[in-house]
Image (cartoon, rainbow, N blue to C red):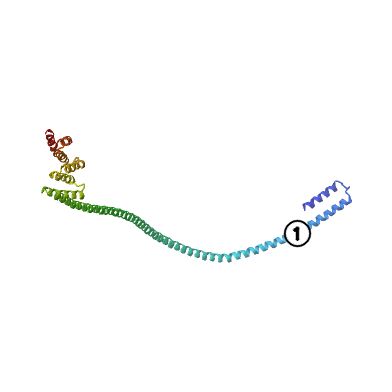
Amino acid sequence: MKKINFVLLVILALSLSGCTMVKNEDWIKLNQDISDLKRDSQDMNKAKEALRSETEDSRVAIEELKKHVDEMEKSTGAQLSSKISITEKALSDAERELRKKQADIVADMSSIRADFQVLTGRFEETKYAIQKGLQEEKVAKEEADRWRKDISQTLEEIQKRISAVEQSLILLRQEKETIKEKAVETSSLEDAYKDGYETYQKGDFPTAREKFQKYLDAYPNSKYSENAIYWIGESYYSEKNYERAIVEFDDVVKKYPDGAKAPAALLKQGIAFSSLGDKKSANAIFKKVTEKYPKSEQADVARKRLKE
């Protein structure tokens, strides 16, 4: 409408200003535009009426819809309230049941916790007992090992001692046998020597020499060997067999220069030379006696012989 009014005002202004010089084409065009504008205006009015009618219909429909909604709200509200009450009751019951279950669960948890503590205590006791048992077993095993080791060492020591004792017994037996043999030998030796000496004392010089010689053959290095040789020399000397006596006495001096019979054997050797008339050899032997055995009784006799 504003556009139409504007156009009319423009036309009116042009008319008033005397603008009569407008061309027909422009005028026609302008009239055409005005016609179009009028038609458009009519169409717009129709559209406006149609819109107003539609708006009224819409308003009525909305009012009816509101009534329907109100009715539905009233109906639905009662149902919803009932449902809400039922739901609240169900929720309350569920909550009570849940609380009861929670209480039961809490009680069960407390019981389980108590049982767990008891089981934990038993487990610790069992664990301690097992560890203690293992430790005691370990200690017992170590003690047993030490005991076995000590026993083994003790047995080894005992075995060594037994072996040492057995060896000592063997040595003692051997020594006993040796002593016995020596005793027998000594007894036999002494008996043999004594037999020879007793025969010599009886004046049976040949038999005495035979017995002394057998003794020397049986016991060449015994404690009576020196005496046996000496008495053989004496037996020859007693028979005035000076040459053989000198040989036997010389044997005593050479074999036993530090023996008990050596000074007597050397002196008798000198006397034997003197008996044979060999004074030079006799004096040489006497001098030797005084030099070699100066403190002996035989040395005193030798000095007297040298002065004759």
SS for callout 1: helix
The foreground one among 63 and 286 is 286
User: Could you tell me residue 204's position as x and y percent?
Assistant: 12, 49
For image coordinates 81% across by 51% down, the residue present is: 7
User: Could you tell me residue 64's position as x and y percent?
Assistant: 65, 64
Number of labels in the image equals 1
Question: Which residue is disc 1 drawn over?
Answer: 47
- At label 1, which amino acid type do we have? Ala
Q: Is residue 121 above or below residue 22?
A: below
Residue occupying the far left of the picture: 202
Residue 152: name its quadrant.
bottom left
The foreground one among 65 and 280 is 280
Q: Quadrant of the C terminus?
A: top left
User: Could you tell me residue 104's position as x and y percent?
Assistant: 43, 63
Label 1: how many residues lie within 10 Å, few (<14), some (14-19) or many (20+)?
few
Q: Residue 254 vs residue 149: left or right? A: left
Q: Residue 167 vs residue 308: left or right? A: right
For image coordinates 52% across by 64% down, the residue present is: 87
Residue occupying the far top of the picture: 307
For image coordinates 83% across by 54% down, the residue present is: 34
User: Could you tell me residue 199's position as x and y percent?
Assistant: 12, 49
Q: Residue 51 vs residue 193: left or right? A: right
The foreground one among 168 and 300 is 300
Q: Residue 113 vs residue 70: left or right? A: left
